[in-house]
Image (tube, rainbow, N blue to C red):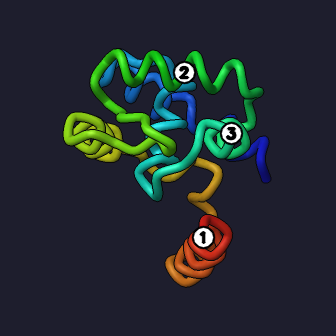
Amino acid sequence: MAAAVIDNRDSWRRAVIEQTGLPFSRIRILRRLARKPMTVKQVAHAATIDAPAATVAVNDLEGRGLVLRCKVVSLTDAGREMVLAIDAVDDPAPNVLAALDDVQLRELKAIIDKLAN
């Protein structure tokens, strides 16, 4: 399942990188912080990176004015706007899903939504 998702998201990844000018590692962190503020340790865990890499990423995002760090890292207004820009990039269903009918697509979406929470 993971391979199917990764293999079919390349065009979206390229588009979102082009739109934002951010490395994808930073985009992943912003999207996670859009759900809730986190400590740097939690950011590292959520983004599956080590703590030093999370610190570097958070420092970069803070330098860009996209996050604010006290004890927890949270999005600034500019960070929230960046997440909106990321979410606005068209993310069409992968071609491999064309074989599914509308009912199957709704069921798959429900499963994915459940896993995301």
Identify the secondary structure beneath mark 1.
loop
| 3 or 1: tag closer to the N-terminus | 3
Give the residue displayed 78% in from the left and 41% down from the top. 3
Task: Write down the residue under mark 1.
Answer: 117
Q: Of the numbered discs in the image, which one, if any, rests on residue 46?
A: none
Identify the secondary structure beneath mark 3.
helix
Of marks 3 and 1, the one in the foreground: 3
State the quadrant of the C terminus. bottom right
* Residue sitting nearer the eye, 43 or 108: 43
Of marks 3 and 2, the one in the foreground: 3
Name the spot of residue 115 as percent of width and height, x first. 67, 69
The kind of residue on which mark 2 rests is: Ala
Q: Is residue 46 above or below residue 29?
A: below
Task: Write down the residue under mark 3.
Answer: 41
Quarter location, residue 69: top left
The kind of residue on which mark 1 rests is: Asn
| 3 or 2: tag closer to the N-terminus | 3
* Residue sitting nearer the eye, 68 or 82: 68
Q: Are marks 3 and 2 in contact (CB under 8 Å)?
A: no
Task: Write down the residue under mark 2.
Answer: 57
Name the spot of residue 51 as percent of width and height, x first. 73, 27
Give the residue displayed 79% in from the left and 53% down from the top. 1
Give the residue displayed 56% in from the left and 29% down from the top. 10
Give the residue displayed 49% in from the left and 45% down from the top. 72
Judged left or right of residue 43, residue 80 is left
The kind of residue on which mark 3 rests is: Lys
Mark pair 3, 2: CA separation: 12 Å
Q: Is residue 12 above or below residue 93?
A: above
Q: Is residue 32 above or below residue 113?
A: above
Mark pair 3, 1: CA separation: 20 Å
Q: Is residue 22 visible?
A: yes
